[in-house]
Image: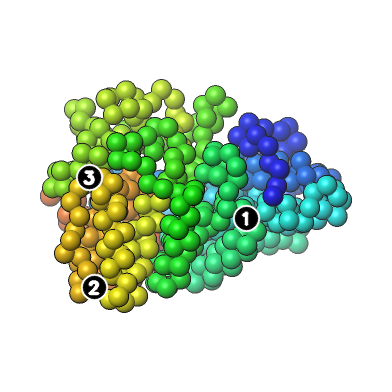
Amino acid sequence: MGKLKNTWFLKSLSVCLLLAALSGCKKFLDQVPENSLTRNEFFKTEADANSAIIGVYDALQTCASQFLQWGEFRADLIASGIALDPIYLQSFNNTNNISNWSNAYRLIGRANIVIEKVPEIPNIDRRFTVEESKAIVGEALFLRALTYFYLVRVFQEVPLVLEAPSSDAVDFLKPKVSADSLLGQIEKDLAIAEQDLPADRGRNIDTRGRATKAAVNSLQADVYLWRAKYTEAAEAARKVIENTSLYSLVPGDRWFKIFSEKNSSESIFEVQFDYQLAEINNIRSLSNTQLVNNTLYNLFVQETDLIRGLNRTYREAGSRQFWKYTGLTVDNVERAADDPNYIIYRLPDVMLMRAEALVHIGDAQKVEAADLINQVRKRANIDSLDFLGQNTPLEIFTSVILKERALELAMEGKRWFDLIRYATNENQPELLIDRVVNSRSVAERAQVRSRIIDPRSWYLPILRDELAKNPNLVQNPYYQ
């Protein structure tokens, strides 16, 4: 395995110089790199490979807040505390900053450099083995796949850039490709990454904060569910769930510490932050602007969910503010620094993904699906749903799973994608439309319905600046 030491502490000058030369904070889609010589001279040692992959994780840190917004703020579990919030009101045009994909493509560009250049290093540095280089490339493949999966769920069609920005021959002005093409490439990247990444990295912060086989399997399960490949999704999730030596549900009385203490036993992949290293984000302030919608509040009340409800997912402080990423304790002590980790995948998410896949495979698999759902509920100290079983209709199962995902994963950047996936795969667009519309105030409902009744509107417009810079881009259909 690679010997990436002090992952979250080393910010070497060499990688900063390299990445400045490669990107200079310019978009990889429209900017030819300026200094190929710097890059060619850089990738010669194991240390160079390690520094380069640190740069990809650094880019991931800049994406975390946007990933949260993309996955949560349009859905039915939040009530925006911002007047006339365009995201909450589904009011988009091609100047909304929510459509800015520059951070995502910066990550992809850095990942592409690692994928291209690191395999050459073992020929130069004999102490750096082929297996170690493959492991670092596997990390880059996972991070590229993860980022493209966000992009395809948010925009549906985007440019597919697989080349490193290494010469003038690279075409930076690419057209969009289909969602199927993007998802196919994601699956290819993950198949390679799964083979080459380790299951365990030794230190807990590395096992939870860097790509592993379980992180790949979790993303595979998510991708397969999105594509309604239920057998494949169930199998990918199984690999994670059965790795009980590394992944287990925390006890119910420690549920809030998943967020306040970071890198718990059920964490699979978290974006790491530490204010002492000047690694901060605005997730806490974003959470403070969002209130728990009555839709979610009523679910907690109906279930008498004391493990995940008041002073855990939210607090009563004049308004029902989200507390997961804001609080430090369950007795109203607020986090002192803007450095909560952003959790991409944790075990209950994967358990519920497997349950969702199983109920689509066949009646015989519904028994295990019910057990997975009830394990999540048992940890929350709420009643098991004993009526679930082999003869339970699919639509009841899907409704139950959506509810459980709301209770467990609210404000973790999952809900909007869950609604799109269910509405699309079950051919029930009204499921998304009705849930989102009914979660808004009476005065807002007609306006919001008119903006999301067309499923093409579920995907964001391409930013005007990108259209101006890239003549090969075409605006997404709903916004033309």
- Image position, residue 262 (x, y; %): 45, 36
Per the rendering, the mark at residue 197 is 1
Circle nearer the N terminus (3, 2): 3
| Nearer to us in this view, 388 or 166 | 388
Q: CA distance from mark 1 to mark 3?
A: 36 Å
| Nearer to us in this view, 97 or 256 | 256
Circle nearer the N terminus (1, 3): 1
| Nearer to us in this view, 172 or 195 | 195
Q: Name the residue: 33% across, 36% down.
A: 254
Kindly state the secondary structure of the residue where label 1 is placed: loop
Label 1 neighbourhood size at 10 Å, few (<14), some (14-19), many (20+)? many
Nearer to us of marks 2 and 1 is: 2
Q: Name the residue: 22% across, 69% down.
A: 389
Circle nearer the N terminus (2, 1): 1
The residue pinned by badge 3 equals: 381
Label 2 is placed on what type of residue? Gln
The residue pinned by badge 2 equals: 390
Q: Quadrant of the C terminus?
A: bottom left
**Is 94 displayed left or right of 35 in the figure?**
left
Against 464, residue 428 (above or below) is below
Mark 2 and mark 1 in contact? Answer it, CB < 8 Å.
no
**Is 23 displayed left or right of 429 in the figure?**
right
- Image position, residue 356 (x, y; %): 33, 65
Q: Name the residue: 37% across, 61% down.
A: 353
Q: Name the residue: 44% across, 43% down.
A: 265
Q: CA distance from mark 3 to mark 2?
A: 24 Å
Label 3 is placed on what type of residue? Asn
- Image position, residue 213 (x, y; %): 56, 56
**Is 24 displayed left or right of 72 in the figure?**
right
Q: CA distance from mark 2 to mark 1?
A: 37 Å
Kindly state the secondary structure of the residue where label 2 is placed: loop
